[in-house]
Image: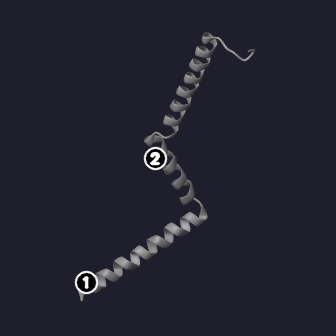
Amino acid sequence: MADERSADVIRADIEQARDQLAISVDQLADRLAPSRVVSEAKASIRQKLSSPVGLAVVGGGAVLLTLLVVRNLRHSRR
């Protein structure tokens, strides 16, 4: 048969596939490293918070928190 390959060719193909798999696993490990994931999440949050909508949300949350604290202080003094 013309499609028959020698054992040496098959071994070389397997070794090449193994090397490619090792490279892929290393790339995935780098992408999913906890420190990198945290770093990218922080950068994303900072970017979103620096937008006008993000600033409005943070400001609204701060106002709401302040109102709740004042309300609880008033209720605790009664």
**Residue at left 75%, top 15%?**
2
Residue 67 appears in which quarter of the rendering? bottom left
Outermost residue on the bottom side: it is 78
Q: Nearer the viewer, residue 8 or 59?
A: 8
Residue type, numbered disc 2: Val
The part of the image, by quadrant, that contains residue 19 is top right
Mark 2 neighbour class, 10 Å CA radius: few under 14, some 14 to 19, many 20 or more = few
Amino acid at dot 1: Ser
75 sits left or right of 59 in the view: left
Residue 38 higher or lower than 63, as above or below? above
**Residue labelled with disc 2:** 38
Looking at this view, name the residue that lies furthest to the front: 1
Q: Nearer the viewer, mark 1 or mark 2?
A: 2
**Is residue 3 shown left or right of residue 75?**
right
Where does residue 12 sit, x and y in percent of width and height?
Answer: 60, 14
- Separation of marks 1 and 2 at Cα, in angstroms: 39 Å
Quadrant for the N terminus in the image? top right
Q: Residues within 10 Å of mark 1 (few under 14, many from 20)?
A: few
Q: Which residue is mark 1?
A: 76
Is residue 5 positioned above or below 34 on the image?
above
Q: Who is closer to the viewer here, 42 or 25?
A: 25
Say what secondary structure mark 1 lies in: helix
Query: Is tag 1's residue or tag 2's residue first in the polypeptide sequence?
Result: 2
Q: Nearer the viewer, residue 43 or 32?
A: 32
